[in-house]
Amino acid sequence: MSESVHVVVMAAGLGTRMRSSKAKVLHEAGGLTMAELIVRQALRLVAPQHIRVIVGHQAEEVQRVLSPYGVQFALQAQQMGTGHAVLCTREFLEHQPGQLLIINGDCPLLRAETLQALLEAASPAEVAGAILTTVLDDATGYGRIVRDDRDALLAIVEEKSANPKQKQIREINTGIYCFRAATFWPALAQVRPDNPAREYYLTDVVGILHREGRTLLPSVVADPREVLGVNNRVELAAADAILRERTVTALMLHGVTIEKPSTVTVDADVQVEADTVIEAFAQLRGKTRIGAECRIGAGALLRNVVLADGCQVQPYCVLEDTAVGQSSRIGPFARLRGGNQLGAHVHVGNFVELKKTTMADGAKANHLAYLGDSAIGANTNVGAGTITCNYDGQHKHHTQIGDGCFIGSNSTLVAPLTVGANSYVAAGSVITHEVPSNALAFGRARQAVKEDGAELVRRKAASKDG
Ligand code: UD1
Ligand code: CA
C-alpha cells in the first residue's frame, strides 16, 4: 500500500432504535459484538495502532471488549452526530498524512475486501476521497447520494432533510468513507448542525468538498446485503443470519457435514475438523473446537468445549468449558457444567451431570449420576444413580476414585472421600470413610428374609378386613 491509512470506527452512539440499555455496537451478530466484527475486518488491512475507535455510550465496556485487539480509542463524551464523532479524533489524526478510512460501527457484514476496493477507488492523487454506496429497492432511512448529470458526487442528503425528489433516489450512503486527510480536516471543521436533528453530520463534508471544487468518487457495492446498517433488532437478526450462513458455509467447504444448515448456530471462532457431522439445531458457541470424525447430535449445545477426534455428543446434551478425549461418547441428555476434563474412550450417558470432574481414559458413568468436584480413575465404572455429596452446606469437598473401580448403583459418596484403585462399592451404599485399594465396601442395612413371610402379611391384612 503506497499511502498510509488510518481507520476510524464510529462506535459512540447508543442506538436508540435498538431500545436497549446496551450500546448498539455491543450487540452481537454471528457470535461477536458488532464492534469486534468491524475491528477484525479493519485489522486485515492495517496494524492495530492505526485503528482509532470512537467510544461514548458505555465507553468502558466497549474498550474492554476491544482491548484484546490492541486498537486505540477516542472519547466522544456527548453524542452530537457523526461529524462531531470524527472531530473527537482530530487531535490524534490531524497531522497524519495519507488516507482516512471512516466506518460506521453498525455495519457488521462489511468485509476487508470491500474496504480495500474503496481505498483503491480513493487512491488517485487528484481525488479528495471515495464514498462506498449501494443501490437499494427501499432506501428509506439512509442518506441519499446526489450526483450531477456527469455522475460526480454533489452531496449526501439525510432522510430527514431530503425533499420528495431526493427521497426517490435509491443509491444510498453506506456510512463507509475514505478521505484524503489533507483536505478532509479543513472541510470537517466547516460542518454546522443546521438540520432538523441539530446534529453535526459527517455526510455534510461531501457537499463542502464539492463546493471547494474537489472530486469525490462513488464506489458502488454490488451486494447491498454486505453494507446493511443495523439500527434495530430486526436488522440485527438479519445480519446474524447472514453471518451464521457464512460460517456454516465455510465449515461445509472445509469438509464438515451439516444437516439442515439453516437450523445450526455456530459462533465465529468455532473450529470443526473434516468429516465431522453436525445434526440439525445443534449450537456450537464461544471458542469450541471439534476434531475430525465427530458427531454432534440434534439440539446439542456446546460452549467453549474441546472435543478430540472421533467423539460423539448425542442429541440434547449441554456441555460447557469441558475438554473431551478421543472417541468418547456423551449423552443423550447429559449435562457437563464447567471445568471437566475427560480422557479417551470415556462414556457419559443419559441424565448424568458433571461439574469440575476429571474422568480418566475408559471411565464410564452411563446413567443418572451426579459427579461434582471429583476425579474418576481409568476404566472405573460409576453405576446408575451414583451421587457425589460434594457440598456440606458451606464448603465443597473432593471425591477421588482410583483406577479400575466398580461403584455400584445408587451409591452415595460423601466427600471428602477417597476410594482406592480396583475396589468395589456395593450398590445402594452410603460411603463416608476412605475405601482402600482392592477392598469391597458395603454401607447399607443388611437384608433380612422371612421364609413364607408374604403369606403371613396377607393373612394379617385379611383378618383386619373381617
Ligand atoms: C448514517 C449516515 C447515513 C447513512 C447511514 C448508513 C450520517 C449523518 N448519516 O445514518 O447517511 O446512510 O449511516 O448506515 O452520518 N455515532 C457516533 N456518535 C454520534 C452519532 C453516531 O459515534 O454522535 C456512531 C453510531 O454509534 C453508529 C454510527 O455512528 O455506529 C452511525 O450512526 P447512526 O446514528 O446509526 O447513523 P444513521 O442515522 O444510520
Ligand atoms: Ca445506522
Image (tube, grey):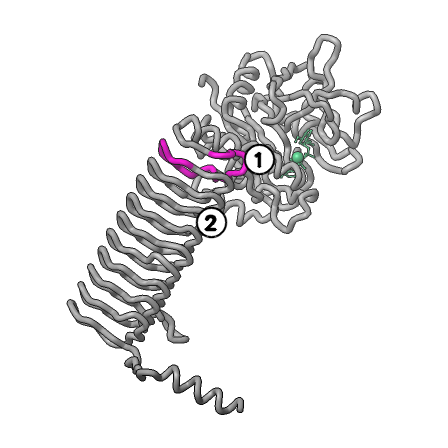
Residue 114, percent across and down? 54, 22
- Visible in this render: residue 84? no
State which image quarter holds ligand 2: top right
* First to last magenta residue range: 259-277
Q: Which residue is mark 1?
A: 241
Identify which amino acid the numbered label 2 is placed on: Tyr
Q: Is 105 above or below relative to 59? A: above
- In the image, 25 versus 376, the foreground residue is 376
Q: Residue at x 69, y 40 (%)?
A: 80
Name the amino acid type tagged 1. Answer: Ala
Question: How many marks overall?
Answer: 2
- Label 1, label 2: how many angstroms apart (C-alpha)? 22 Å
- Is 301 left, or right, of 404 in this rendering? right
Residue 266 vs residue 444, the one in the foreground? 444
Give the structural element (helix, strand or loop) at label 2.
Answer: loop
Give the vertical position of 16 relative to 399 (above or below): above
Residue 378 lies, in percent from the top left, at: 22, 56
Q: Closer to the camera, 456 or 439? A: 456
Instruction: Bin the neighbour count of mark 1 within 10 Å (Cα to Cα): few under 14, some 14-19, many 20 and up.
Output: some
Q: Quadrant of residue 25?
A: top right
